[in-house]
């Protein structure tokens, strides 16, 4: 039987659950599944966990507990929420939400693959595309008086419940929350309030 790594759906919104299964493996074998993603600045984020196949030679992350790695226990989305930067102090954030998804590569190894220095080819791979904007969502650039930002509108005529999204103290215009909320029926203004275009460089 051919070894397969199956992720369903492989193309969906970033908050949609993904079912991950490995099949075609020997029974009662310890395997590794690794997740890897790059941000738009080529910073690498990775996670991995170890699992024991059942009698049919399968691993189902909705049922099979992780025995170690970056998380333990049964967590269907564990490989996603435990992604961490290879270089410290980087945060995984999507900037261009309208034109491209986060592309997460899942790799299956038929052993415990822990050491980065050991290059072992994967037995199967699967690419998962995670979007921050759904079909039909519109983005409008806002520049009115001193207001700077981006307005995200769901498809349809509305009216829609409205949200203003201000994002912490990192500055600039951060849009991934606003675009995702608009994908679920909210009209959202991602509001920049410093370090963006002609706005002050520091909060005032």
Image (spheres, helix red, strand yellow):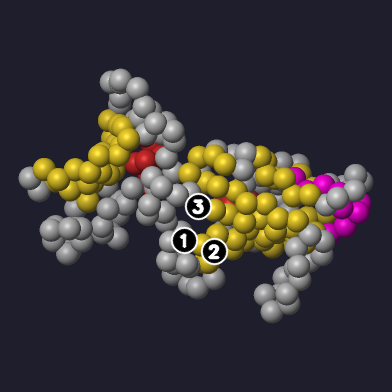
Residue contact between numbered discs 1 and 2, judged by CB atoms under 8 Å: yes
* x then y, percent, for residue 154: 35, 30
**Hey, which quadrant is residue 162 in on the image?**
top left
Q: Report the mark closest to the observer, 2 or 3.
A: 3
- Tell me: residue 18, above or below residue 25: above
**Quarter in which the C terminus is drawn:** bottom left
**Does the stretch in magenta take in 22?**
yes
**Does the stretch in magenta take in 175?**
no
Q: Residues within 10 Å of mark 2 (few under 14, many from 20)?
A: many
Q: Residues within 10 Å of mark 1 (few under 14, many from 20)?
A: some
* x then y, percent, for residue 116: 67, 75
Which residue is rendered at x = 30% and y = 24% of the image? 160
> What segment is highlighted magenta in the picture?
21-30
Q: Which mark is residue 102?
A: 3
Give the CA distance from mark 1 to mark 3: 7 Å
- Tell me: residue 90, above or below residue 4: below
Label 2: element kind:
strand
| Relative to 166, 41 lies left or right | right
Q: Earlier in the sequence, mark 1 or mark 3?
A: 1
Q: Which mark is residue 39?
A: 1
Q: Which mark is residue 53?
A: none
Visible in this render: residue 86?
Answer: yes
* Residue toward you, 68 or 100: 100
Q: Earlier in the sequence, mark 2 or mark 3?
A: 2
- Reading the image, the residue beneath label 2 is 45
Which residue is rendered at x = 13% and y = 58% of the image? 198
């Amino acid at each position: 039987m051919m070894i397969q790594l199956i992720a369903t759906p492989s193309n969906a919104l970033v908050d949609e659950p993904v079912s991950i299964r490995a099949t075609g493996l020997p029974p009662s074998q310890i395997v590794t599944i690794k997740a890897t993603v790059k941000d738009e600045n080529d910073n690498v984020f990775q996670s991995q966990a170890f699992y024991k196949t059942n009698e049919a030679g399968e691993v189902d992350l909705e049922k099979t507990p992780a025995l170690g790695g970056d998380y333990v226990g049964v967590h269907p989305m564990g490989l996603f929420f435990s992604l961490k930067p290879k270089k410290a102090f980087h945060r995984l954030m999507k900037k261009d939400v309208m034109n491209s998804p986060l592309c997460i590569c899942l790799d299956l190894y038929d052993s415990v693959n822990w050491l980065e220095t050991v290059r072992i080819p994967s037995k199967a791979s699967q690419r998962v595309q995670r979007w921050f904007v759904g079909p039909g969502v519109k983005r409008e650039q806002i520049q009115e008086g001193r207001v700077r930002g981006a307005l995200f509108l769901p498809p349809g005529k509305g009216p829609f419940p409205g949200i203003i999204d201000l994002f912490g103290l990192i500055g600039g215009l951060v849009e991934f929350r606003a675009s995702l909320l608009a994908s679920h029926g909210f009209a959202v203004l991602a509001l920049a309030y410093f370090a963006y275009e002609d706005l002050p460089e520091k909060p005032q």
